[in-house]
Amino acid sequence: MLTIDVQTQIQRPAHEVFAFLADFTHMPLWNYYVRSVRQVTAGSLGIGTVFDQVRKTDRQQYVITELIPDQQVAVRTLAPARPLTLLFRVAPGTQGTLVIETWELDTGLPGPLERLAQSRVRGRRSPRIWLLSRPCWRREKRSCPMGAACAIPSRGHNHKELISHQ
């Protein structure tokens, strides 16, 4: 099992950050590899909600397996996709909100190769939290993913600095 943990601070209230991350239809806004995500099951978000995700090279479905409002949400891929669990934990901090993103992937690799892969990945930043480092989408003539139209100039900005988003 390959496990990757990434921690990031976001200068927004925890409930806003959680609401954004827990709605997986937002994933294409912050994950460059994801083309679209559609909620398959009807109704509001909850345990058992299924999503269909189209990425650059494949398609997969996943289901919400854990949900603690404003604190934690987890999804797990459905067969035939390789088993993957993605967990977001959100907690208020002194500098905004702490987001802990955990990826657990069954790679199918033998133990020594999996440990080697994990050590190489740990040294790199997760490609998944583009919400935090990618310039604002307003430069691409879209509204900012953190809310209504962005008040920061269209040259773009870093989402570690979300002070101006109201």
Image (cartoon, rainbow, N blue to C red):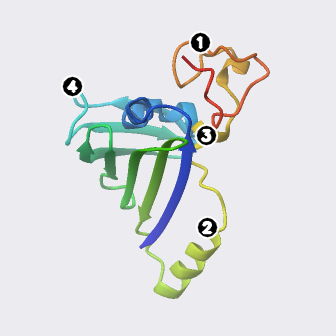
Residue 132 image label: 3
Q: Which residue is mark 1?
A: 149
Q: Are marks 2 and 3 in contact (CB under 8 Å)?
A: no
**Is 37 situated left or right of 11 in this image?**
left
Mark nearer the N terminus (4 vs 2):
4
Viewer-side residue, 92 vs 152: 92
Distance from disc 3 to disc 1, alpha carbons, whole Å, reads: 17 Å
Mark nearer the N terminus (2 vs 3):
2
Question: Is residue 32 at all visible to an observer of this figure?
Answer: no
**Is 162 situated left or right of 69 in this image?**
right
Query: Residue 120 is drawn in which quadrant?
Result: bottom right
Disc 1, SS: loop
Around disc 4, counting alpha carbons within 10 Å, would you say few (fewer than 14), some (14 to 19), or many (20 or more)? few
Disc 4, SS: loop
**Residue kind at label 2, given as amino acid type:** Val
Residue 161 pos. (x, y %): 65, 33
**Residue kind at label 3, given as amino acid type:** Leu
Viewer-side residue, 145 vs 75: 145
